Image (cartoon, rainbow, N blue to C red):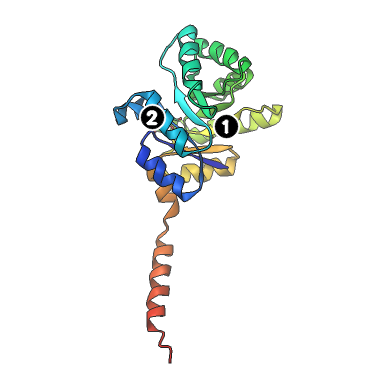
Amino acid sequence: MRIFLDTANIEEIKAAAELGIISGVTTNPSLVAREGRPLRQVIEEICQLVDGPISAEVISQETPGMLKEARELASIHPNVVIKIPITTEGLKAVKILSQEGIKTNVTLVFSANQALLAALAGATFVSPFIGRLDDVGQEGMEVLHDVVSIFAQYGLSTEIIAASIRHPLHVLEAARLGADIATVPYSVLLQMIKHPLTDVGLARFLADWEKLKVK
Ligand code: E4P
Protein backbone atom coordinates (compact mmCIF):
# COMPACT_ATOMS: atom_id res chain seq x y z
CA MET A 1 0.00 0.00 0.00
CA ARG A 2 1.27 3.46 -0.89
CA ILE A 3 0.99 6.51 1.37
CA PHE A 4 -0.20 9.92 0.18
CA LEU A 5 -0.15 13.01 2.40
CA ASP A 6 -3.54 14.66 3.01
CA THR A 7 -2.67 18.32 3.38
CA ALA A 8 -2.12 21.58 1.48
CA ASN A 9 0.54 22.78 3.92
CA ILE A 10 3.87 23.21 2.16
CA GLU A 11 6.00 22.79 5.30
CA GLU A 12 4.30 19.48 6.13
CA ILE A 13 4.74 18.28 2.55
CA LYS A 14 8.44 19.23 2.55
CA ALA A 15 8.99 17.41 5.85
CA ALA A 16 7.12 14.29 4.73
CA ALA A 17 8.83 14.28 1.31
CA GLU A 18 12.23 14.23 3.06
CA LEU A 19 11.23 10.97 4.75
CA GLY A 20 11.10 9.39 1.28
CA ILE A 21 7.90 7.47 1.87
CA ILE A 22 5.08 9.51 0.38
CA SER A 23 4.16 9.01 -3.25
CA GLY A 24 1.39 11.58 -3.66
CA VAL A 25 -0.61 14.39 -2.05
CA THR A 26 -4.35 14.99 -1.70
CA THR A 27 -5.88 18.39 -1.01
CA ASN A 28 -9.47 19.55 -0.65
CA PRO A 29 -11.11 23.01 -0.50
CA SER A 30 -11.03 23.05 3.32
CA LEU A 31 -7.32 22.20 3.44
CA VAL A 32 -6.44 24.83 0.80
CA ALA A 33 -8.62 27.49 2.50
CA ARG A 34 -6.67 26.86 5.71
CA GLU A 35 -3.49 27.98 3.90
CA GLY A 36 -5.07 31.27 2.73
CA ARG A 37 -3.42 31.13 -0.70
CA PRO A 38 -4.74 30.62 -4.25
CA LEU A 39 -5.29 26.96 -5.20
CA ARG A 40 -3.19 27.22 -8.37
CA GLN A 41 -0.18 28.57 -6.47
CA VAL A 42 -0.44 25.84 -3.81
CA ILE A 43 -0.73 23.04 -6.39
CA GLU A 44 2.20 24.40 -8.42
CA GLU A 45 4.39 24.35 -5.32
CA ILE A 46 3.31 20.85 -4.29
CA CYS A 47 4.14 19.56 -7.78
CA GLN A 48 7.72 20.79 -7.32
CA LEU A 49 8.04 18.87 -4.04
CA VAL A 50 6.41 15.50 -4.76
CA ASP A 51 6.71 13.50 -7.96
CA GLY A 52 3.39 11.63 -7.86
CA PRO A 53 -0.36 12.16 -8.10
CA ILE A 54 -1.40 15.54 -6.63
CA SER A 55 -5.16 15.88 -6.13
CA ALA A 56 -6.82 19.30 -6.55
CA GLU A 57 -10.59 19.61 -6.14
CA VAL A 58 -13.09 21.49 -8.28
CA ILE A 59 -15.64 23.83 -6.69
CA SER A 60 -18.29 23.96 -9.45
CA GLN A 61 -21.36 21.79 -8.99
CA GLU A 62 -22.35 21.62 -12.67
CA THR A 63 -20.53 19.51 -15.26
CA PRO A 64 -19.46 22.40 -17.56
CA GLY A 65 -17.95 24.35 -14.67
CA MET A 66 -16.23 21.24 -13.34
CA LEU A 67 -14.73 20.56 -16.77
CA LYS A 68 -13.46 24.14 -17.09
CA GLU A 69 -11.82 24.06 -13.66
CA ALA A 70 -10.47 20.54 -14.26
CA ARG A 71 -8.81 21.47 -17.55
CA GLU A 72 -7.20 24.56 -15.99
CA LEU A 73 -5.89 22.58 -13.02
CA ALA A 74 -4.69 19.70 -15.21
CA SER A 75 -2.64 22.18 -17.26
CA ILE A 76 -0.51 22.97 -14.19
CA HIS A 77 1.43 19.68 -14.28
CA PRO A 78 1.00 16.15 -15.68
CA ASN A 79 0.81 14.80 -12.09
CA VAL A 80 -2.30 16.81 -11.22
CA VAL A 81 -5.37 14.66 -10.50
CA ILE A 82 -8.80 16.31 -10.50
CA LYS A 83 -10.93 15.65 -7.46
CA ILE A 84 -14.60 15.46 -8.35
CA PRO A 85 -17.46 14.83 -5.90
CA ILE A 86 -19.67 11.77 -6.48
CA THR A 87 -22.79 13.45 -7.85
CA THR A 88 -24.68 12.99 -11.11
CA GLU A 89 -22.90 16.06 -12.50
CA GLY A 90 -19.61 14.80 -11.15
CA LEU A 91 -19.97 11.40 -12.81
CA LYS A 92 -20.61 13.05 -16.18
CA ALA A 93 -17.49 15.15 -15.72
CA VAL A 94 -15.40 12.09 -14.75
CA LYS A 95 -16.46 10.26 -17.92
CA ILE A 96 -15.53 13.19 -20.16
CA LEU A 97 -12.24 13.84 -18.36
CA SER A 98 -11.25 10.18 -18.55
CA GLN A 99 -11.87 10.27 -22.32
CA GLU A 100 -9.59 13.33 -22.49
CA GLY A 101 -6.87 11.49 -20.55
CA ILE A 102 -7.24 13.71 -17.47
CA LYS A 103 -6.84 11.77 -14.22
CA THR A 104 -9.61 11.98 -11.63
CA ASN A 105 -10.09 11.18 -7.94
CA VAL A 106 -13.77 10.75 -7.07
CA THR A 107 -14.27 12.13 -3.60
CA LEU A 108 -16.86 12.20 -0.80
CA VAL A 109 -17.50 8.50 -1.34
CA PHE A 110 -19.48 6.94 1.51
CA SER A 111 -20.85 3.74 -0.06
CA ALA A 112 -19.58 0.88 -2.22
CA ASN A 113 -22.24 1.68 -4.83
CA GLN A 114 -20.85 5.21 -5.20
CA ALA A 115 -17.36 3.76 -5.62
CA LEU A 116 -18.60 1.27 -8.24
CA LEU A 117 -20.24 4.05 -10.27
CA ALA A 118 -17.09 6.16 -10.09
CA ALA A 119 -15.02 3.25 -11.40
CA LEU A 120 -17.51 2.59 -14.23
CA ALA A 121 -17.29 6.27 -15.21
CA GLY A 122 -13.53 5.85 -15.61
CA ALA A 123 -12.18 7.37 -12.40
CA THR A 124 -8.44 6.95 -11.85
CA PHE A 125 -8.90 6.95 -8.07
CA VAL A 126 -11.84 6.65 -5.72
CA SER A 127 -11.74 7.95 -2.13
CA PRO A 128 -13.95 6.29 0.49
CA PHE A 129 -14.01 8.55 3.58
CA ILE A 130 -13.37 6.24 6.54
CA GLY A 131 -13.27 8.67 9.49
CA ARG A 132 -16.40 10.60 8.55
CA LEU A 133 -18.35 7.32 8.35
CA ASP A 134 -17.05 6.29 11.77
CA ASP A 135 -18.11 9.74 13.06
CA VAL A 136 -21.76 9.01 12.24
CA GLY A 137 -21.68 5.49 13.67
CA GLN A 138 -21.23 3.59 10.42
CA GLU A 139 -18.14 1.42 10.10
CA GLY A 140 -15.93 3.05 7.50
CA MET A 141 -13.82 -0.08 7.17
CA GLU A 142 -16.84 -2.14 6.13
CA VAL A 143 -17.38 0.20 3.19
CA LEU A 144 -13.68 0.01 2.32
CA HIS A 145 -13.80 -3.79 2.53
CA ASP A 146 -16.77 -3.88 0.13
CA VAL A 147 -15.05 -1.53 -2.31
CA VAL A 148 -11.83 -3.59 -2.31
CA SER A 149 -13.78 -6.86 -2.80
CA ILE A 150 -15.99 -5.53 -5.60
CA PHE A 151 -13.11 -3.94 -7.51
CA ALA A 152 -11.11 -7.19 -7.21
CA GLN A 153 -14.07 -9.35 -8.25
CA TYR A 154 -14.61 -7.39 -11.46
CA GLY A 155 -10.98 -6.47 -12.16
CA LEU A 156 -11.71 -2.73 -12.01
CA SER A 157 -8.53 -0.73 -12.49
CA THR A 158 -9.60 2.33 -10.46
CA GLU A 159 -7.27 2.66 -7.48
CA ILE A 160 -8.73 2.86 -3.98
CA ILE A 161 -7.56 5.65 -1.67
CA ALA A 162 -8.55 5.15 1.99
CA ALA A 163 -9.34 8.77 2.94
CA SER A 164 -10.48 10.69 6.01
CA ILE A 165 -7.86 8.82 8.04
CA ARG A 166 -7.84 9.81 11.70
CA HIS A 167 -5.29 7.53 13.39
CA PRO A 168 -2.68 4.81 12.71
CA LEU A 169 -5.19 1.96 13.18
CA HIS A 170 -7.12 3.27 10.17
CA VAL A 171 -3.93 2.95 8.10
CA LEU A 172 -3.21 -0.55 9.41
CA GLU A 173 -6.72 -1.76 8.67
CA ALA A 174 -6.70 -0.16 5.21
CA ALA A 175 -3.45 -2.01 4.46
CA ARG A 176 -4.91 -5.30 5.74
CA LEU A 177 -7.97 -4.87 3.53
CA GLY A 178 -5.85 -4.22 0.46
CA ALA A 179 -6.49 -0.54 -0.25
CA ASP A 180 -4.05 0.69 -2.89
CA ILE A 181 -3.32 3.92 -1.02
CA ALA A 182 -4.04 5.59 2.32
CA THR A 183 -3.96 9.39 2.33
CA VAL A 184 -2.90 10.49 5.79
CA PRO A 185 -2.62 13.78 7.66
CA TYR A 186 0.96 14.67 8.64
CA SER A 187 0.12 14.16 12.34
CA VAL A 188 -0.92 10.55 11.65
CA LEU A 189 2.24 9.94 9.63
CA LEU A 190 4.30 11.03 12.66
CA GLN A 191 2.22 8.79 14.96
CA MET A 192 2.94 5.84 12.64
CA ILE A 193 6.69 6.33 13.05
CA LYS A 194 6.57 6.44 16.84
CA HIS A 195 6.49 3.50 19.26
CA PRO A 196 7.23 3.80 22.99
CA LEU A 197 9.32 0.62 22.91
CA THR A 198 11.50 2.14 20.18
CA ASP A 199 12.16 5.16 22.42
CA VAL A 200 12.89 2.99 25.46
CA GLY A 201 15.09 0.64 23.44
CA LEU A 202 17.09 3.48 21.95
CA ALA A 203 17.62 5.12 25.35
CA ARG A 204 18.85 1.78 26.75
CA PHE A 205 21.26 1.17 23.87
CA LEU A 206 22.74 4.66 24.31
CA ALA A 207 23.02 4.27 28.10
CA ASP A 208 24.78 0.89 27.70
CA TRP A 209 27.11 2.36 25.09
CA GLU A 210 28.10 5.09 27.54
CA LYS A 211 29.16 2.39 30.03
CA LEU A 212 31.60 0.91 27.54
CA LYS A 213 35.17 1.66 28.61
CA VAL A 214 37.62 0.91 25.86
CA LYS A 215 41.06 0.24 27.34
C1 E4P B 1 -9.53 13.08 1.07
O1 E4P B 1 -9.02 13.17 -0.01
C2 E4P B 1 -9.91 14.21 1.93
O2 E4P B 1 -9.09 15.30 1.64
C3 E4P B 1 -9.70 13.94 3.40
O3 E4P B 1 -9.18 12.64 3.61
C4 E4P B 1 -10.87 14.28 4.23
O4 E4P B 1 -10.53 14.01 5.57
P1 E4P B 1 -11.35 14.61 6.80
O5 E4P B 1 -12.61 13.82 6.96
O6 E4P B 1 -10.43 14.43 7.97
O7 E4P B 1 -11.62 16.06 6.49
Which residue lies under the disc numbered 2?
Answer: 42
> Counting other residues with Cα less than 10 Å from the Cα at mark 2, is it few (<14), some (14-19), or many (20 or more)?
some
Name the residue: 57% across, 20% down.
102
Which residue lies under the disc numbered 1?
Answer: 160
Q: Is mark 2 within 8 Å of ligand 1?
A: no
Name the residue: 57% across, 16% down.
97
Q: Name the quadrant where ligand 1 sits.
A: top left
Residue 148 placement: quadrant: top right
Q: Point out the tag, 1 or 2, that comes first from the N-terminus.
A: 2
Name the residue: 40% across, 61% down.
196
Q: CA distance from mark 1 to mark 2?
A: 24 Å
Residue 157 placement: quadrant: top right
- Most foreground residue, 47 or 67: 47
Residue 44 placement: quadrant: top left
Q: Quadrant of the C terminus?
A: bottom left
Q: Percent from the top left, x then y, of residue 141? A: 52, 36
Name the residue: 44% across, 53% down.
193
Numbered badge on residue 58 = none
